[in-house]
Amino acid sequence: MERTLIIIKPDGVERALIGPIISKFEQRGLKIVGMKLMQVSDELARKHYAVHAGKPFYEPLIEYITSAPVVVMALEGPQAIQAARNTIGATRPVEAAPGSIRGDFGMMVGRNLVHGSDSPENAAAEVALWFEPSELIDYTRAVDSWILE
Ligand code: DAT
Ligand code: MG
């Protein structure tokens, strides 16, 4: 089992797309093990996007992610990182497949609606950065045997 960190970015919250975005992950079969609405601080934004520090889009990215509340989730499932990335779609929404979140709802890279961790190492670090252990809930869904072989 893997866990991955998902952020519904400020445009997703402001555009009233929280429900449709969560539905994509829920319908896929990914299990929500943590979820909260929060205003991201400048400090947390810079930690989360540290890998992009110095790039031309870094400051606009920090401004964007701190510009309105976000919904942050930890999702669990087999190969959850790859499954979630595919459900989110390509970084540039015009290149994202129809049916993906960015492909269905997005137009531009700087308003691409969702973040998803990109590797097991980053997923573990990001889940730990955004959630306290006590905010992550272990439970079994009654439908799990219909989703997981
Ligand atoms: P992703 O969010 O698909 O993992 P990433 O980690 O490469 O993409 O970049 C993080 C975010 O930074 C991305 O969602 C949007 C922004 N970004 C990335 N590359 C960009 C670019 N060339 N121009 C503008 N914004 C960019
Ligand atoms: Mg990334």
Image: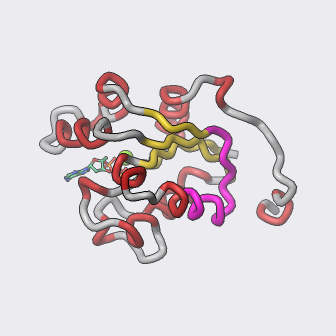
Q: Residue at x 46, y 34 (%)?
A: 38
Camera-side residue: 134 or 69? 69
As drawn, the residue found furthest toward the bottom would be: 98
Asked which quadrant contains residue 106, the reply is bottom left
Camera-side residue: 72 or 144? 72
Q: Residue at x 50, y 36 (%)?
A: 121
Q: Position of residue 107 (x, y in %)?
A: 27, 67
Asked which quadrant contains residue 146, the reply is bottom right
Q: Which residues are magenta?
A: 22-34
Camera-side residue: 62 or 77? 62
Q: Residue at x 87, y 55 (%)?
A: 142
Asked if the stretch drawn in magenta spans residue 75, the answer is no
Q: Position of residue 53 (x, y in %)?
A: 22, 32
Query: In the picture shown, does residue 102 fall above or below 1?
Result: below
Q: Is residue 117 visible?
A: no
Q: Residue at x 59, y 40 (%)?
A: 35
Q: Position of residue 42 (x, y in %)?
A: 29, 26
Asked if the stretch drawn in magenta spans residue 25, the answer is yes
Q: Quadrant of the C terminus?
A: bottom right
